[in-house]
Image (cartoon, helix red, strand yellow):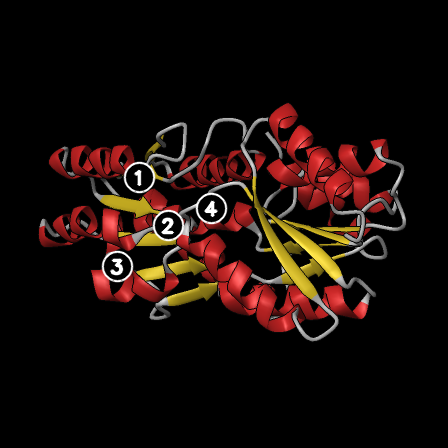
Amino acid sequence: MITSKLAPWLFLAVTWLVPITGLAQKKPRIVFITHAQTGDPFWDVVRKGAETAAQETDSDVQYQSPGKFDLVEMSHLIDAAVASKPDGLIVSIPDAKVLGKSIQAAVAAKIPVISVNSGLSVSHQLGCLMHIGQEEESAGRMAGERMKDIGAKEVVVLNQEAGNVGLDQRVKGFKDGFEGPFHHVHVLPVRIDFWACYNTVVAHLQQHPEIDGILALGPVAATPALKAVVDVDEVGKIKLCTFDISREVAEALSKKQMSFAVDQQQWLQGYLPVVFLANYAKHGALPKNDLILTGPSFVTPENVDRVANLISKGSP
């Protein structure tokens, strides 16, 4: 999960930043707003990272999300946060057209803002201090190349958040890395509901027996897709892969029921922005990097045991 390039830098950053918080007089209040949907285990890990950082920096962190993929409601949450004048604001940016005005209002109000997870291409333009996440299109391209290398030719991509620009970038990159005269991609919208997703995948597999690969854009789609593959008796024939890690994904990798997962270390996406903003509020200290890449890295059946402890640490 923590790559060799990131680990030394992270160690220096945290050992420098966290201990000095005891010298400060003020307890920072930081609002953390994401587009998380209820039932998505990815964001539970992000929140756990934020809670850990809040404890270590003695900060008041208020985590909020719409509960469903509703960007208008998310913009209202950001507006309310700006009106409350926090010491820092952390946001994901799945669609700058909807959220950009609210984020720029925060910057205009002199509230330091860090973006996480989605929004890398617009973060600086909107006035954020930095972005923490992965380059989604590049990660998608790498996933497409790897899927091709393991022998898949007809792949269906499961998209659980239609309209999320970050997921669209993953799909675009995947197609660039995978598609060709003998390699084809279908995109299938699914819901963040286990049985609804399961039924959609089963029906699609029955209608398209030529499919030999599934790429889920998150664990919330990967878990029901795994049951679907098992129930139609296609384990081994259909290569199942996913973006992002969860406890269920790690278990499936250990059992060799999945081929790989693309990990962007979401625990760090919750942890690092809180550490940075807390110390910025107290001491004016902030790394000069305006982009912190937490991914991608690939977790496979061969190396999943090495990251099992970190996965467990980040699980709710």
In front of the other: 120 or 15: 120
Give the number of the disc on residue 71.
1
Which amino acid type is shown beneath numbered disc 4? Tyr
In front of the other: 148 or 185: 185
Which amino acid type is shown beneath numbered disc 2? Pro
Residue drawn at (65%, 45%) of the image: 245
Give the number of the disc on residue 128.
3
Which amino acid type is shown beneath numbered disc 1? Leu
In front of the other: 257 or 253: 257
* Residue 133 spot, x, y in % from top left: 47, 58
* Residue 186 spot, x, y in % from top left: 62, 55
Residue drawn at (77%, 64%) of the image: 153
Which amino acid type is shown beneath numbered disc 3? Cys
* Residue at numbered disc 2: 94
Q: Residues within 10 Å of mark 1 (few under 14, many from 20)?
A: many
Q: Quadrant of the N terminus?
A: bottom right
